[in-house]
Amino acid sequence: MTAADVAAAADRFTGVIPPTPLQRNERLSARHGLDVWLKREDLNAVRSYKGRGALNFVRSLDAGQRRQGVICASAGNHAQGVAFACASLGIRARVYLPRTTPRQKRDRVAHLGGESVRIVVTGETYDDAAAAARADAEDLGMTLLPAFDDPRTIAGQGTVVKEAVEQLGRAPDAVVVPVGGGGLLAGTLAWLREEHPEVRVVGAEPLGAPSMAAALEAGHPVQLEHIDPFVDGAAVRRVGRFTHAIAAAGRPRMVVVPEGRICGEILDLYQSDGIISEPAGALASAALGPDLDLPSGATVLCVLSGGNNDVSRYAEIVERALVHEGRKHYFLIDFPQEPGALRRFLDEVLGPDDDITRFEYVKRNNRETGPALVGVELGAPENLAPILKRMDDAPHRVERIFPDSPLFGFLV
């Protein structure tokens, strides 16, 4: 992989994929004391950068490969890129999606691909879908179009940062990119190491799927035993062979970002900036903070990689953000089975800015007390200590449910 490969990919996009905007973000700049710019890949035709790699790959196929068609696996965004590329060139494609892919992404794949694309839903994770796609590619004689682990895909993804630096008119001090399988990270490193080797590259991974960090530590790609699929665009168990090799040579700074912080950034992007971001799209800007050790006023380019978010997910996004911020807490409380018990709890335990957001009896019987699951949203995180003290003083038996406990996942 060279900078020339990335430049050649960019030339193939002329007239097909218009440049996406580069915008300075006042909120993030003020919050972190930096000069923060967002590369808005959510605003292209497929609402993510994935169309770049897919189009570069498909345009490199010979006539026989085009007749046979392509096959791919995706968590959603790569599938849209493949659908867009194949529909524009009249090439048939089979797209494999895990069952966790949001409905919004499935519908977009069907819309972009039209009659050129057949969707196959299989498995619980991207890796499950990828295994099925590899097996069927061999049986059907179709060309496998990797989501990240191919030089042609990587070169296409690398055009994101090349384009952004040209729009900025100078090299930034740092570039922060989201990392799933590593295609965007590898393409970024391949171009910058020749054109602007002084730029610091940061790869941001979700805490529940740090596959590139694990690979760099081990010296080779490794299979994560468990992943959290919430950040679906970056929830990959194993990074690619090519992407790992380029990352190992480029030595990026890797950071992991808690899913709750990502959710908070999704909400800030929406409420403050009017930007609809999916979880993977908010990874880069959510990674900003003291952990990056950047000098005050440094110019930082963050790739907002996608905006394919399903509106039905916002309830969970809000929930995860509140729990991460320390404003949402859950308790099992044994209430006396008598009139006025809940009213006394409200009067004696809750503060004036606190609220009960969930109340559900988990076991109904004729005993003198009954356990209830109670969700409390605090007016501010610092209200927790006083409310815990009032709970200790109350006559109820109270058990706090911590987010990292198995009981939390079962009940909440």
Image (cartoon, rainbow, N blue to C red):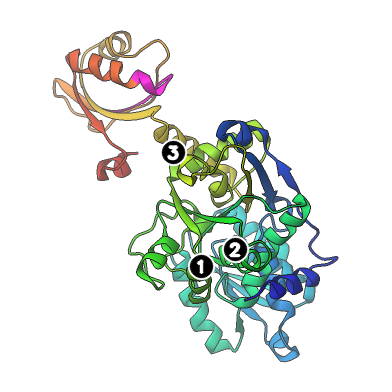
Residue 272 in sight from this viewpoint:
yes
Q: Secondary structure at mark 1?
A: helix
Residue extending farthest bottom: 64
Within 10 Å of the Cα at label 2, are there few (<14), some (14-19), or many (20+) other Cα atoms? many
Q: Position of residue 207 (x, y in %)?
A: 41, 51
> What is the quadrant of the N terminus in the image?
bottom right
Of badges 1 and 2, nearer the viewer stands 1
Q: Position of residue 36 (x, y in %)?
A: 64, 41
In the picture, measured across the screen, residue 337 lies left or right of residue 20, that is left
Q: Is residue 75 above or below residue 296?
A: below
Identify residue for label 1: 247
Residue range of the region highlighted in magenta in the rendering: 373-383
N-terminal of the pair, mark 3 or mark 2, is 2
Q: Amino acid at mark 2?
A: Leu
Mark carried by residue 320? 3
> What is the quadrant of the C terminus in the image?
top left
